[in-house]
Image: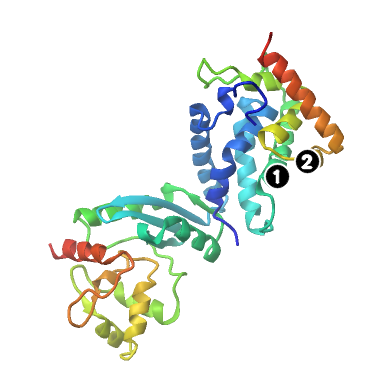
């Protein structure tokens, strides 16, 4: 397109400031129109935290996914498009409350999350485990064995580990509060450093 | 498998805006862009995975632009001058006003072929003419633009 004229007109150059401003305005309008027309199946945004950027995604029903940077946000968004809906837009408005609560949690001023959750990315035993985790209080930890016993499947310790490792809503559903019976950390989707930070924050 | 719609907006938003501005002028382009992407978002889940997304968007934009033009004709606004890029920096020559001086078909052919990069055959399918006519319209349109853009 830049070959129409000798020397591309500024209006056709990439990242023309007026065009970039127009596109950002139009994006905001699309977010509003899409939500009003019930076409915004998944809205997402990122928030910066002491353990790196987090991606928050919500359906009209509630928060559906929280992801760590090391999971690669593009991969996470592609998976959401496939598993929930491709009608997915960067749209911070729907995530205002969740983002604020995440900020407050990392500032140490919030101990429980109070946002609607959409559990559709987990089911069966994994969901049972995660619902149990939701009841483990701030600063409290349980072992994988205890969680298995509490969910009525005392021999399913490994499956509890898998449920934690595939938790679509980490931090909010506190799988970081589950440790090995000997007190060692076990695993964490966000990395063991992140798990240490979260446990340290809650122990303070 | 479908990519997130956000990616469609990021990849094609600027091109569709240029197409809308070329066909309608800057003033009405925002409405056409918004209606294009809202309609695209609605239809996106049923778009075949191997579809040419840009051609699909330009086809929708073409229809939305025609809607805007018809609405404009039904209720003509007292616009004395060609739409101008009011918000653009002063040093930016008014490309969109130049494009607006072209006849309809040339404007569309230039927009879809040069700004959106579609082949003449697809441009022809969108406008509803033969590929030869689309080719002539876009080359005549560009020649006219060059003459106005680069006066001696």
SS type, badge 2: helix
Q: Compare marks 2 and 1 and give the one earlier in the sequence.
A: 1
Which of A29 and A53 lies nearest the eye of the viewer? Answer: A53
* Colour mapping used in the image: rainbow
Residues packed near mark 2 inside 10 Å, few (<14), some (14 to 19) or many (20 plus)? many
**Mark 1 falls within which chain?**
B
Judge left or right: residue A77 versus residue B40. Answer: left
Mark 1 — residue? B55
Q: Quadrant of residue B85?
A: top right
At a point 70% along the width and 43% down the height, the residue shown is B60
CA–CA distance between discs 2 and 1?
Answer: 9 Å
- Residue B57 visible in the picture: yes
Q: Position of residue B56 (x, y in %)?
A: 70, 47
Which of A21 and A103 lies nearest the eye of the viewer? Answer: A21
Tell me: residue B152, above or below residue A28. Answer: above
Which of B46 and A63 lies nearest the eye of the viewer? Answer: B46
Residue furthest toward the top? B152
- Residue A68 visible in the picture: no
At a point 67% along the width and 18% down the height, the residue shown is B98
SS type, badge 1: helix
Judge left or right: residue B67 versus residue A135. Answer: right
């Amino acid at each position: 397109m830049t070959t129409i004229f000798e020397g591309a007109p500024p209006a056709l150059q990439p990242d023309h400031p007026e065009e970039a401003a127009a596109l950002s305005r139009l994006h905001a309008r699309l977010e509003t129109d899409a939500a009003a027309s019930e076409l915004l199946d998944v809205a997402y945004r990122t928030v910066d935290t002491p353990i790196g950027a987090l991606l928050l995604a919500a359906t009209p029903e509630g928060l559906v996914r929280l992801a760590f940077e090391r999971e690669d946000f593009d991969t996470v968004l592609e998976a959401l498009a496939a598993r929930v809906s491709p009608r997915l837009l960067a749209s911070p408005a729907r995530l205002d409350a969740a983002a604020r609560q995440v900020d407050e949690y990392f500032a140490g001023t919030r101990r429980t999350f109070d946002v609607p959750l959409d559990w559709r990315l987990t089911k069966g035993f994994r969901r049972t485990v995660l619902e149990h985790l939701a009841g483990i209080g701030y600063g409290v930890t349980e072992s994988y064995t205890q969680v298995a016993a509490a969910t009525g499947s005392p021999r399913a310790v490994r499956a509890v580990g898998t449920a934690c490792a595939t938790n679509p809503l980490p931090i909010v559903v506190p799988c970081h509060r589950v440790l090995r019976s000997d007190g060692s950390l076990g695993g964490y989707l966000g990395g063991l450093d992140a798990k240490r930070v979260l446990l340290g924050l809650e122990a303070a | 498998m479908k990519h997130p719609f956000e990616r469609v907006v990021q990849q094609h938003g600027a091109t569709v805006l240029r197409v809308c501005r070329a066909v309608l002028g800057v003033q009405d382009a925002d409405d056409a862009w918004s209606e294009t992407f809202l309609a695209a978002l609605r239809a996106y889940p049923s778009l075949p995975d191997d579809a040419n997304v840009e051609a699909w968007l330009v086809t929708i934009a073409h229809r939305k632009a025609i809607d805007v033009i018809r609405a404009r004709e039904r209720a003509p606004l007292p616009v004395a001058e060609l739409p101008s890029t009011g918000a653009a920096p002063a040093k930016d020559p008014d490309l969109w006003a130049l494009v607006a001086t072209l006849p309809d078909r040339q404007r569309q052919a230039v927009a879809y072929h040069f700004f959106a990069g579609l082949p003449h055959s697809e441009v022809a399918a969108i406008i509803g003419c033969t590929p030869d006519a689309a080719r002539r319209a876009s080359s005549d349109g560009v020649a006219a633009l060059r003459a106005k853009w680069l006066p001696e």
